[in-house]
Image: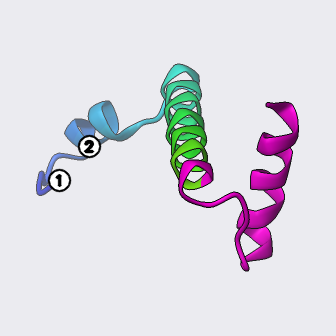
Amino acid sequence: MGHTDGSVQARYSHITRQMREDLMANLTAEWEAALDARLAMCTTSPVAVLNDPLHRLRARR
């Protein structure tokens, strides 16, 4: 942050439980939106790490 006084960095750089929960919720929403968009383009992927979630998403619909 560029401050020589460590108290400034300590005040603004800590991560709270709520911040972590908000981040996880937002990242999950982005991942799910990306999967929806990918599924709309094609229902399978040659990449297993992507194909498995696409398969589960297809099965739920």
25 or 42: nearer the viewer: 42
Give the magenta-colored segment's residue range: 39-61
Whether label 2 touches label 1, CB < 8 Å = yes
16 or 60: nearer the viewer: 60
SS class of the residue under badge 2?
A: helix
Q: Which mark is residue 1?
A: 1
Q: Residue at x 75, y 53 (%)?
A: 54
Task: Please name the amino acid that badge 2 sits on.
Answer: Gln
Q: Residue at x 57, y 45 (%)?
A: 31
Q: Is residue 51 magenta?
A: yes
27 or 51: nearer the viewer: 51
Magenta portion: prevailing SS class: helix
| Residue 15 in picture, x, y percent from top left | 47, 34
Instruction: Judge whether 8 appears above or below 55 on screen.
Output: above
Left or right placement of residue 53 versus residue 38 in this view: right
| Residue 28 in picture, x, y percent from top left | 60, 37
